[in-house]
Amino acid sequence: MAINQPFGFDATGRTIQAADADHLLQDIETLMFTRPGERVNRPDLGSGLFQLVFAAGGSELATATQYLVQAALQRWLGSMVQVLAIEVSAEEATLTVQIRYLPAGAQQPLVAAFSRPAPL
């Protein structure tokens, strides 16, 4: 068990815990939507996705974004997850990331989709 994200307390006043699978999913989401430079003690943590939301579209940008996300996942979560496929799309200032991954020690791949409005 690990601390849940976002941090909070349960009805008894204890820190909310997350199961390992949920915690991994929360770590992936945090990594995807953290901007490099946003974390004080880890200025290089993040994927840089938001800088690409308003860039000109095209297959080259989509491919570059997929590599950017995969590189961030391999660097920061490589020992916990194997990335199988990534799809990134930006429509009407909303960024959507779909990741197909295999958690370490698991037999079945999982799919997670995250969507966020682009920051102004």
Image (tube, helix red, strand yellow):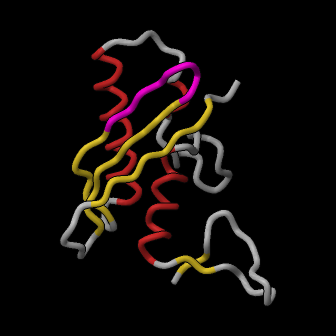
From the viewer's side, name the closer residue of 115 and 20: 115
Quarter residue 89 falls in: top left
From the viewer's side, name the closer residue of 59 and 112: 112
In-image side of 77 versus 2 (left or right): left
Q: Which quadrant would the C terminus be assigned to in this image?
A: top right
In-image side of 90 versus 4 (left or right): left
Picture layout, residue 111 above or below residue 58:
below
Residue 30: x and y in percent read 55, 53
Picture layout, residue 87 above or below residue 92:
below
* Magenta stretch, overall SS: strand
Question: Residue at the location (28% across, 56% down)?
Answer: 101
Task: Based on the picture, tell me whether residue 65 belongs to the magenta stretch.
Answer: no
Residue 6: x and y in percent read 67, 63
Residue 18: x and y in percent read 55, 76
Residue span colored magenta: 87-94
Question: Residue at the location (64% across, 56% down)?
Answer: 41
From the viewer's side, name the closer residue of 4 and 37: 4
Question: Residue at the location (52% across, 61% down)?
Answer: 26
Residue 114: x and y in percent read 49, 45
**Number of numbered discs on residues:** 0
In-image side of 49 versus 4 (left or right): left
Task: Based on the picture, tell me whether residue 91 belongs to the magenta stretch.
Answer: yes
